[in-house]
Image (spheres, helix red, strand yellow):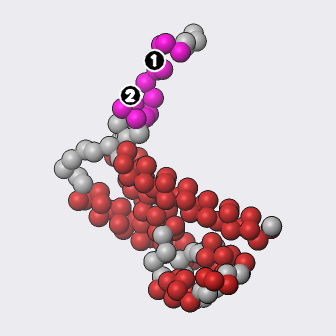
Amino acid sequence: MGYSINQPAPHNALGPQGVGAYWSPPVQFIFRVAAIYFTLQCIPLDARFYRFLFSINWLHLQFSDVFALARYTPRFFSSTESYADWGIIFLIALVAAVGWTYADRQRFKPYNEVFYWVRTIVRYRLAIAVIAYGFIKF
């Protein structure tokens, strides 16, 4: 049986009100972990990043400066990149999601706004990276 444009689609996981209308508790927890993880991956929290940002000569910007800014990843262990840093971020996100779940246990609230902001942050972060790589290849 097909559906026409005028007929509503059958019930799905997102529900008629949009994202988060019918999320089960496990799905909410997974969303909380993912939202915190991707936010921590995208937003620079290192003092080293900001020291580098303010040390750039913006009047004589070089490709290496743009490239270094675009490929930012949080580092906990050393100045070299490591997948262990991703594991630390995941553990931080897991602990924060447990705290968020505990704090939010009394009320059910769709995460439309949080979902929107996480998507926006990730989109801008990816756009910055793609534009920077485009400048390097130019």
Q: Residues within 10 Å of mark 2 (few under 14, many from 20)?
A: some
Residue matched to label 1: 8
User: Left or right of 38: which side holds 66?
Assistant: right
User: Which segment is the magenta one?
Assistant: 5-18
Residue 93 percent across, percent down from the top left: 42, 66
- Residue visible at 43% across and 49% down in the picture: 116
Q: Secondary structure at mark 1?
A: loop
Residue 83 percent across, percent down from the top left: 61, 74
Quick one: 22 or 72, which is closer to the camera? 72
Quadrant of image for the N terminus: top right
Q: CA distance from mark 1 to mark 2?
A: 9 Å
- Residue visible at 58% across and 12% down in the picture: 2
Amino acid type at image mark 2:
Pro
- Residue visible at 27% across and 45% down in the picture: 109
Asked if marks 1 and 2 touch (Cβ < 8 Å), the reply is yes
Amino acid type at image mark 1:
Pro
Quick one: 75 or 58, which is closer to the camera? 58
Residue matched to label 2: 16
Residue 127 position by quadrant = bottom right
The dominant secondary structure in magenta is loop
- Residue visible at 48% across and 70% down in the picture: 43
Q: Residues within 10 Å of mark 1 (few under 14, many from 20)?
A: few
Quick one: 31 or 130, which is closer to the camera? 130
Residue 56 percent across, percent down from the top left: 60, 86
Quick one: 134 or 19, which is closer to the camera? 134
Does the magenta run of residues contain 12? yes
